[in-house]
Image (cartoon, rainbow, N blue to C red):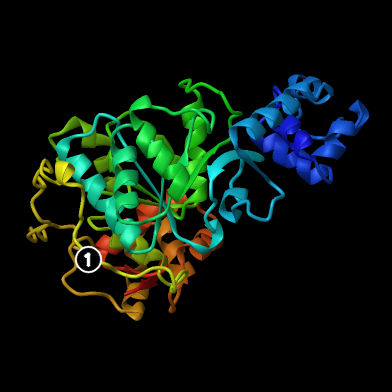
Amino acid sequence: MQVHWIWLAHRPGVTDRMKSILLEHFSDPEDIFFAEESAFRGISGLTDHALEGLLDKNLTQAEEILDTCDRKGLQILTFSDEHYPQRLKNIADPPIVLYYQGELPDFDNNALIAVVGTRKASPYGLAAAKRMGWQLAKCGGIVVSGMAFGIDGVAMQSALAAGGTVVGVLGCGADVVYPVSNRQLFADTAQFGCILSEFPPGTPPVSWNFPKRNRIMSGLSCGVLVVEAPEKSGALITAHQALEQGRDVFVVPGNIDVDTFVGSNRLLRDGGILASHGWDVLSEYEAQYPDKLHKDDEPVRLPREQSADLPKVAQKPRIPAKKEKSDKKVIDKPKQSSYSDVNKEQTRLSDSEKRIVSAIGATPRLVDDVIAETGMSAAQLLPLLTVLEVRGVIKRLPGRYIALK
């Protein structure tokens, strides 16, 4: 029953990870609700505070939440529902209940991309967010965002203008418009996509809810696109959570003299994938969703009052760097190495790089398969892949495949 799912979802002291563990021990939340204290004693990691919450059998709060959802037209998606996204199920701490309004997209059969960035965006960042949101939608992707002021909201508005589907993930109740200035975006998202939250209706937008919300944004998505992020930014939290979840991280390059790009440019240095067009992102998933994704170069068409003020992109086109004399020939190799040549170069690679080369072998491999075979985390592997790509040892292929050159 939904009332028991809601009861479990909001047990004080019980972490999201522990809720998943409990669901592995018991058949459903109803069994957890009726379980006696002795049934919990053998569960590792269960604190006294959590046990106290589980032994509180009062359903009043859960029943009130159900009544509120009914009055406000909010739907409830539980962990056992057939429409619950499989990608989100696979993270370490999935929410077991989501409240939503609008229509759920087919999460598992579409490429969802989270677009994130600073609220205090530069004119260039806002222009890039508009362009990326439009292109992602036109190329068949679904844009996920936190609906915040700045990069998030602009990307969603542009995706909607392109006729795309969007998903808003909130750090407050799914019935709470935040920020208030995004009221129209809130209404449009509910009409042409959906608004999700793990927090009960009426929950205010308190600061500690947003980092928790970010794991859902990345967990729903195939990858996260960081448009503009300063050194300390919620967008970087989302990017790091994405890496921990095995997701791809894409970055729009920014002006190195602007503080709001320090964090995002650092992500590029650490292995983020450079993206200057929505197709740069979605081409990674073309093999997985061949009937959904396609390149589209239709120019961005925004309302006149917006397009008139769009700044020209203050970025010079990327020019291949001139080769400089260096003793580190392994970085500036003039020739691409064949697979047999790579074997001869083994002594020049670190132990970790050798493990990666060995795992790839003679045929293209999925990045996820290389992660599994090497035993590395995504956060460890992705920067090393970038180094190997720069050295000319490997190359990236569509569909998250990599191969030796």
Query: In the image, 267: left or right of 86?
Result: left
Q: Residue 106's quadrant in the figure?
A: bottom right
| Front-lying residue, 187 or 178 | 187
| Vertical position of residue 207 compared to residue 308: above or below | above
Q: Which residue is mark 1?
A: 297
Residue 254 showing in the rendered view: no
- On the image, the x and y values in percent for residue 211 come to 47, 30
Q: Residue at x 71, y 36 (%)?
A: 19
Query: In the image, 178: left or right of 135?
Result: right
Residue 176 showing in the rendered view: yes
In this view, which residue lies farthest toward the front? 71
Q: Residue at x 66, y 30 (%)?
A: 15
Q: Residue at x 36, y 36 (%)?
A: 184
Quadrant containing the N terminus in the rendered view: top right
- On the image, the x and y values in percent for residue 334 come to 16, 71
Q: Residue 21's quadrant in the figure?
A: top right
- On the image, the x and y values in percent for residue 326 come to 12, 57
Query: In the image, 26: left or right of 192?
Result: right
- The tally of labels here is 1
| Front-lying residue, 387 or 283 | 283
Quadrant containing the C terminus in the rendered view: bottom left
* Amino acid bearing label 1: Asp
Secondary-structure class at tag 1: loop
